[in-house]
Image (cartoon, rainbow, N blue to C red):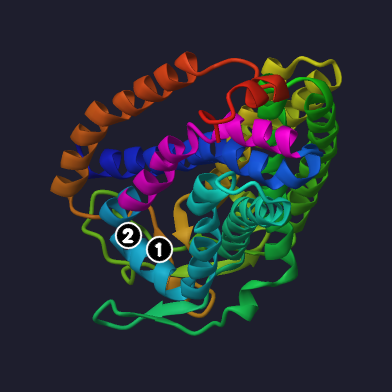
Amino acid sequence: MDYETLKLIWWLLIGVLLIGFAIMDGHDMGVGTLLPFVGRTDLERRAVINTVAPHWEGNQVWFITAGGALFAAWPLVYATAFSGFYWAMMAALWALFFRPVGFTYRSKIHNAAWRSSWDWGLFIGSAVPPVIFGVAFGNLLLGVPFHFNDLLMSTYTGSFWALLNPFALLAGVVSLGMITFQGANYLMMRTEGGIYRRARTASLLFGVLTFVTFALAGWWVTGIDGYVITSIIDPNGPPDPLAKTVETAVGAWMANYHTHTWTKWVPIATFAALAAGILFARLNKAGLAFWSSSAACAGIIGTAGVSMFPFIMPSSTDPRSSLTVFDAVSSHLTLGLMLGVTVIFMPLIVIYTSWAYKVMWGKITTEFIAANEKSVY
């Protein structure tokens, strides 16, 4: 398999891992975000927690695998992003710390203040990371202030507060709306009664919010500076970020939609999936609403990917230093070996995850929680 093909395959595979994370760990985070609002009593909140508590650690495999793949397939992106977005990444990790301890310790003590505190801790650990991830994607579309020297050592010249610009915050709202919509539809499938009704209301609210903010972000992107490679690139050549010239132009992120018209179907399908999810939630078709919101997650991430292609991490201070699919990758041998490992282990992840959900599927009710006080979260 030639080098160019491997580069493109790994662009797709990392996209698949991010989509898997948004769908699987996304519904966990969506449920955690809704926890303090859809559960009115302690039993109701325990019912909400038990819809995701047996699975959330397994779903984190998508997040961990995406990070590992980023490190191995795109080492320059990994190094530059984690140094430039250091404090943002630390904030996401600090928030994530609330999830394992919250699930473990929340119901250990029969004390209302104790349990309420952990409920809000689970809310923070579920709502903050997707906002930060969305803000990061927003800044990628705007360009990140970094540059390489002749030894390919990167220097980040921005600040944490500069990341919190209006467009990036809008992208954060899109991300939060997307995962909360996903979580609400999942809760509709796993609960009944008052929890179900509140989850349905949340699904309609966050479905509309995601639809509107995604449309607004798309309109905004048409008016910001995008990036375009103006020199000839060798897709099979060795990785060298400085061996190209790059220019910025207003609306350049729309170029792929004009050059490859089939890409227009990605955002169109995303809007269709969001609309279908809202409609199915309205009609109390929880399963169809969940699959529609899952497709919307894939579409939102896919839209960002096809808009930026071949760029992965554009540089706003030195456009030539921008990292692309073709010059930020590992060696031919590394990509080939990783592909072999992925072909073996990716199906295993899907198989054991599907089995776990099948075995533990069913409605979680307050009556079940009360009858199994010692054996549930």
Q: Residue at x 67, y 16 (%)?
A: 287
The number of numbered badges drawn on the structure is 2
Residue 76 found in image quarter: bottom left
Type of amino acid at the residue the image marks with label 1: Leu
Which image quarter holds the C terminus?
A: top right
Crowd around label 2: few <14 · some 14–19 · many ≥20 (10 Å): many
Crowd around label 1: few <14 · some 14–19 · many ≥20 (10 Å): many
Residue 273 in the image: above or below residue 242: above
Q: Nearer the viewer, residue 222 or 364?
A: 364
Q: Nearer the viewer, residue 189 or 296?
A: 189
The first of marks 2 and 1 along the sequence is: 1
Q: Nearer the viewer, residue 17 or 2?
A: 17
Residue 328 circle label? 2
Type of amino acid at the residue the image marks with label 2: Ala
The answer to whether any part of residue 233 appears in the image is yes
Q: Does residue 312 belong to the magenta stretch?
A: no
Residue 265 in the image: above or below residue 282: below
Residue 119 in the image: above or below residue 315: above
Which image quarter holds the N terminus?
A: top left
Q: Residue at x 35, y 44 (%)?
A: 65
Q: Residue at x 67, y 52 (%)?
A: 123
Residue 184 circle label? none
Residue 348 in percent (x, y) is at 30, 24
- Asked if the residue under mark 1 is in contact with the one under mark 2, i.e. CB atoms within 8 Å, the reply is yes
Residue 28 in percent (x, y) is at 58, 39
Residue 355 in percent (x, y) is at 40, 17
> What residue is pinned by disc 1?
323
Helix, strand or loop status at disc 1: strand
Helix, strand or loop status at disc 2: loop
Range of residues picked out in magenta: 42-68
